[in-house]
Image (cartoon, rainbow, N blue to C red):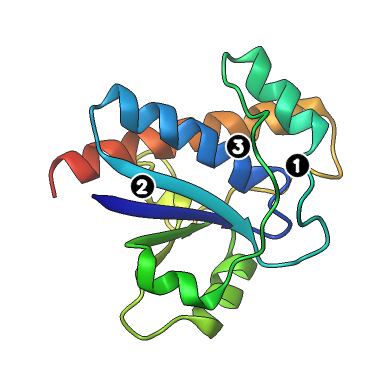
Amino acid sequence: MKRVCLVCLGNICRSPMAEVVLRRTFAEHGLDVVVDSAGTGDWHVGNPMDERALATLAEHGYDGSAHRVRQFDRAWFAERDLVLVMDRENLRDIRRIAPPDADVRLLRSFDPTAPEGAEVPDPYYGGPEGFVEVLHMIEAAAEGLAKHLENH
């Protein structure tokens, strides 16, 4: 069984949305993958995800109500096969604490239509359309990742 962790800054918008989407996508593909998420920061630990992220998920048929914010712990590398981050800042922060053999990548690297180095932008300071855009980016990457895992 594979284990994948999604990481963003606060674990309130992008990574919990990705966790919910990847869980469903993997289930639809019949893949046995454990998915969780965390933030690089600790500001929101224990809280639910951002209400706008939750609403966007619900509007598109996903349920993110069980999510509670966690901070990434470097000990988790031993239990995760793949750590997927949302942007280059997250990539830098996670690689800084990662062991040399850790598989840490940008989530959108699995979207075949995304340009090299594409990031999932943080929708926190914008309006609802930003959350919808992020959801579509995550869904595209999730499909690409599922196909990748089916072939490996």
Residue 55 found in image quarter = top right
Mark 2: amino acid:
Phe
Q: Nearer the viewer, residue 132 or 4?
A: 4
Name the side, left or right, on which 1 lies relative to 64: left
First reached walking from the N terminus: tag 2 or tag 1: 2
How many badges with numbers are in the image? 3
Cβ–Cβ under 8 Å for marks 3 and 1: no
* Residue neighbourhood size for the residue with mark 1, other residues' Cα within 10 Å, grouped as few (<14), some (14–19), many (≥20): some
Residue at numbered disc 3: 17
Mark 3: amino acid:
Met
Name the side, left or right, on which 90 lies relative to 131: left
Return the x and y of residue 67 as percentages of the image width and height: 65, 39
Residue sitting at x 23%, y 37%: 147
Q: Nearer the viewer, residue 34 or 116?
A: 34
- Looking at the rendered structure, the secondary structure element under dot 1 is loop
Residue sitting at x 57%, y 57%: 7
Residue at numbered disc 1: 123
Name the side, left or right, on which 140 lies relative to 9: left
- Looking at the rendered structure, the secondary structure element under dot 3 is helix
Residue 124 found in image quarter = top right
